[in-house]
Amino acid sequence: MWADFVEVAFARMVSRFGAAEVKRWNIMAWNEIDDHDTDGLIMTPQGYCNYYDATQEGLMRAGLEGQFGAPDDGGHLGPIAFRFFAHLVNGTSFFGGAPAMPSYIGAHNKGKDSGPGEHTATIMQDSGRDICQIRMSAHGLIGAGTTTTPGGKSIPWSNDESDPLVGWDQKLDWRADARYPAMMAKVIAQHHCAWMHPNASSPACPGVTSARNHSSADNGSELSVAGCALIPGKTPVATGPAAFEGVPFGFLSFDGAFMNFGPDGFWDRRTFTTRFLMNHSVPAPGIETFRKLSLNVMTPLSKLGNRALQVVRANP
């Protein structure tokens, strides 16, 4: 039934927008499933796998196979995510045969309030942790030496909510000015350095190496694979740039498509626009919406090419 709905819904989108346009979309599964935010629905691990299989089936019928990603957990990979990974490797699709592989595996790794000016420092640490968790779980879905995916190719990794700080409704002054888009650009640079220049230690990647190579300790690790280590009693960590090698990067995005709410907080929440409710305007009430700098910065970023230039700032 769900597969039928997905087929009809996306067939309508294809008829409205055209197949070429719809095939450019990244279609995401129900996200942050391990946070149990399912609007009152009971989603068991097997139920999530069935939901995934049915969505893939519906998209395939609509001619849109190969562009559905999962699980997009909320900053950590939980039991449903790992049950899903096992389903991909050893399970059988609800519709028979091997389950279709996702177009990407991702999580929502955002910055944390780790100190003044250090909101983004934990993003790469958390991505390294999640990648290492998957690589060390014997599921063989991402990274060098992948053996369980068709053709032996690693599934790409994506972070589609890489915001500088969690909590969209927190009122913070830097979210209202140029510091917000600057931090967004910094996050992009961090990911670029981690994937495109994994061994970089030059000024072209300032501060990224230390974030990428974060580890509480290397001594006493009971298992390590390609830049990852499992510290006894702790979550796996990335101990070096090799953790990212062999893992294709899918895409990066930010989660700011919210509408601010009054009576205050017009500019200083994690939004791309701000709105003013003109309740007493004449001849009729209305809403005025303005772009914030966090949205404006995306225009020049969309013009980026495919060649990186090293820029070194010289002290005056």
Image (cartoon, rainbow, N blue to C red):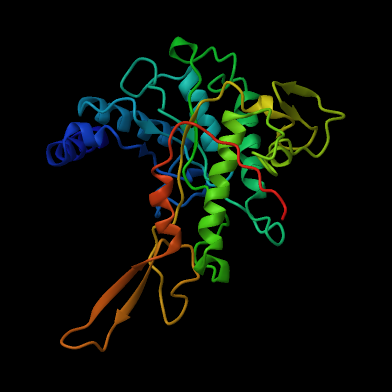
Does residue 81 appear to the left or right of 276 in the view shown?
A: right
Residue 156 visible here: yes
Q: Position of residue 80 (x, y in %)?
A: 52, 37
The residue nearer to you, when weighing 212 against 292, is 292
Residue at x 61%, y 20% (from the top left corner):
138
Residue at x 23%, y 36% (from the top left corner):
21
Q: Quadrant of residue 76?
A: top right
Q: Quadrant of residue 100?
A: top left
Q: Position of residue 146 (x, y in %)?
A: 55, 15
Does residue 252 appear to the left or right of 20 in the view shown?
A: right
Q: Quadrant of residue 257?
A: bottom left
Quadrant occupied by the N terminus:
top left
The residue nearer to you, when weighing 33 against 251, is 251
Q: Position of residue 129 (x, y in %)?
A: 66, 36
The residue nearer to you, when weighing 299 against 125, is 299
Q: Is residue 302 above or below residue 91?
A: below
Residue 1 visible here: no
